[in-house]
Image (cartoon, rainbow, N blue to C red):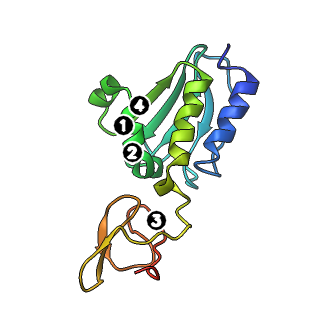
Amino acid sequence: MNLQSDEVAARLLDAAKKFDETAYSKSWNGKKQRPIAKLHYGNDKDPGMAHRTEITSAKNNIYWWIGVQSPMYIKYGQIIDKYDDKDWRARWKDETRIIFSSEEEFFSFVDECLSKDNNADINTPLPPKGMSADGFVVICPRCDTKFKRAERCPECGQLINYEEE
């Protein structure tokens, strides 16, 4: 199957919008790689390699480029690390990439990311993973960051529910 077809591109863009509703695609000029989706999480400009998340396709592969400081990597880093291209990561410290040889592999990765209970929407309140005895320092249930008690985690933006203490 040609992974650069309009039908495949539309399905991949729909999947990207599950991670970032502002994801968009650029027109393709027929070159080797077709741009499928740019996930800039609301940024108007390209945020740079460390913060970008983009999906492209070649005839036989789908590439997902993920900056190590992007919201996607912060949220799904443990899953991404299982799939990433180790050689690429060793060469480019600010970015990793995942290469999928089929649509099925791509959607298996998407399903794994979205099916994890701890990767629910950041606007769904979750109880802290841990808390100091005095309750002033908490641990984020999503990214394990320790921070002073606040409504949201300063690192990943997860909404914290303190009512279940």
Query: Circle 1: is it few (<14), some (14-19), or many (20+) Cα within 10 Å?
Result: some
Contact? badges 2 and 4 (CB < 8 Å): no
Residue identifier under label 3: 157
Q: Secondary structure at mark 1?
A: helix
Residue identifier under label 4: 83
Contact? badges 1 and 4 (CB < 8 Å): yes
For the residues labelled 1 and 4, the Cα–Cα distance comes to: 5 Å
Residue identifier under label 1: 81
Query: Circle 4: is it few (<14), some (14-19), or many (20+) Cα within 10 Å?
Result: some
Q: At label 2, which amino acid type do we have?
A: Gly
Q: Secondary structure at mark 4?
A: helix
For the residues labelled 3 and 4, the Cα–Cα distance comes to: 25 Å
Q: Secondary structure at mark 2?
A: helix
Write the residue at 67% across / 17% down.
30
State the quadrant of the N terminus. Answer: top right
For the residues labelled 2 and 4, the Cα–Cα distance comes to: 10 Å
Task: Give the mark toward the camera: 1 or 3.
Answer: 1
Placement of 117 over or under 13, stated as above or below: below
Check the image and name the residue furthest to the right.
Answer: 7
